[in-house]
């Protein structure tokens, strides 16, 4: 009898143990399923992170490109057919745009609400001379605008003469290599030609139009800076000294081609120690006119 009771108790314990194992098996199965699900989704996330970023910059060179805006009041000058000059140097892109007047005095790469707190980042205007289809010319403001990527919208705030900032969305699109045929030297003689300065802090300017002299097919430009503190210029390793001793620094430099960014270095003594600053100068063939 005692043996029968012991056997019964043992069987009951085994049955209870069996039920407990069955109940614990369900969560284990669910846990395994969740782990498998995690493993399956991991490659998808990894695949997304491995997607290469789009190329931001074009190959180094000079391009013409559309300057698109969301405003009929803020756009490229009508003489430019909605386009500007896009210069790419060391992977950095800068779009020069001549506007329709001098009513926009500064630009800010960002939102209007942030502009007042970042005055050091305001883009400064250049004075451009544009020539219309009827042959008349006019001075307007132009700007050198940093571009992170083509065919991509970005925010650009504008400051008008009334002192109010406005938000705009712009883009640079349809970049095409600059027309090389326009780079041919004109016939020997003296001309005036609009010149665009890019680079540096944006505070320096050069007089435009500049005087361009052509002799035996070689072009020489007279470049007048907005400061008397430039003591030499470097072009293709050659040093050029000012041709004047009073007034703003003036240089005579060679111009290899029109409509093509000419890399120059100008040394300024305006700071505590002399500094060499890299710029580009572009002489526009469309503005060429015989000197009076």
Image: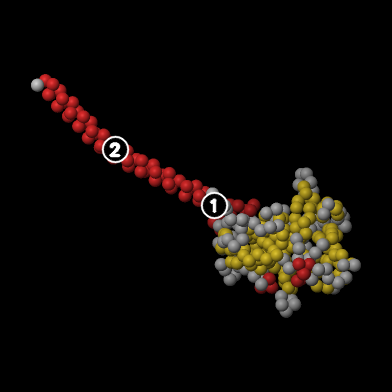
Q: What residue sits 75% from the left and 61% below the top?
A: 261
Which residue ends up furthest to the right in the rendered image? 216
Q: Is residue 271 above or below residue 289?
A: above
Q: Is residue 277 left or right of residue 77?
A: right
Q: Is residue 123 left or right of residue 290?
A: left
Percent position (x, y) of residue 43? 47, 47
The image quadrant where one finds the C terminus is: bottom right
The image quarter containing residue 242 is bottom right
Name the secondary structure under disc 1: loop
Q: Is residue 36 left or right of residue 188?
A: left
Percent position (x, y) of residue 67? 63, 66
Percent position (x, y) of residue 38? 41, 44
Q: What residue sits 73% from the left and 68% below the top?
A: 179
Residue 34 at least partly seen: yes
The image quadrant where one finds the N terminus is: top left
Binning the other alpha carbons within 10 Å of mark 1 as few (below 14), some (14 to 19) or many (20 upward) gives few
Q: Which residue is mark 2?
A: 25
The one of 118 and 7 positioned closer to us in this rendering? 7
Binning the other alpha carbons within 10 Å of mark 2 as few (below 14), some (14 to 19) or many (20 upward) gives few
Q: What residue sits 32% from the left and 41% below the top?
A: 29
The one of 130 and 3 positioned closer to us in this rendering? 3
Which residue ends up furthest to the left in the rendered image? 1
Q: Is residue 12 left or right of residue 98?
A: left
Q: Which residue is mark 1?
A: 51
């Amino acid at each position: 009898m005692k043996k029968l009771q012991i056997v019964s108790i043992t069987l009951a314990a085994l049955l209870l143990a069996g039920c407990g194992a069955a109940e614990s098996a369900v969560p284990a199965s669910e846990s395994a399923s969740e782990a498998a699900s995690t493993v399956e989704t991991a490659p998808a996330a990894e695949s997304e992170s491995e997607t290469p970023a789009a190329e931001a910059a074009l190959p180094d060179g000079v391009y013409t490109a559309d300057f698109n805006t969301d405003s009929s009041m803020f756009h490229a000058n009508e003489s430019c057919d909605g386009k500007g000059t896009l210069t790419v140097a060391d992977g950095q892109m800068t779009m020069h745009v001549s506007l329709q007047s001098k009513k926009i005095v500064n630009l800010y790469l960002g939102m209007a609400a942030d502009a007042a707190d970042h005055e050091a980042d305001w883009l400064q205007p250049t004075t451009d001379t544009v020539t219309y289809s009827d042959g008349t010319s006019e001075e307007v403001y132009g700007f050198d605008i940093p571009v992170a990527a083509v065919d991509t919208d970005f925010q650009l705030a504008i400051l008008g003469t009334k002192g109010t900032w406005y938000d705009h969305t712009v883009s640079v699109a349809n970049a095409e290599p600059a027309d090389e045929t326009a780079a041919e030297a004109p016939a020997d003689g003296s001309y005036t030609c609009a010149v665009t300065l890019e680079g540096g802090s944006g505070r320096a300017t050069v007089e435009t139009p500049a005087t361009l002299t052509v002799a035996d097919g070689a072009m020489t430009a007279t470049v007048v800076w907005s400061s008397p503190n430039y003591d030499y210029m470097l072009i293709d390793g050659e040093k050029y000294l000012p041709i004047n001793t009073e007034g703003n620094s003036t240089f005579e430099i060679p111009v290899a081609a029109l409509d093509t960014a000419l890399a120059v270095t100008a040394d300024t003594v305006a700071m505590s120690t002399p500094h060499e600053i890299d710029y580009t100068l572009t002489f526009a063939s469309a503005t060429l006119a015989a000197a009076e």
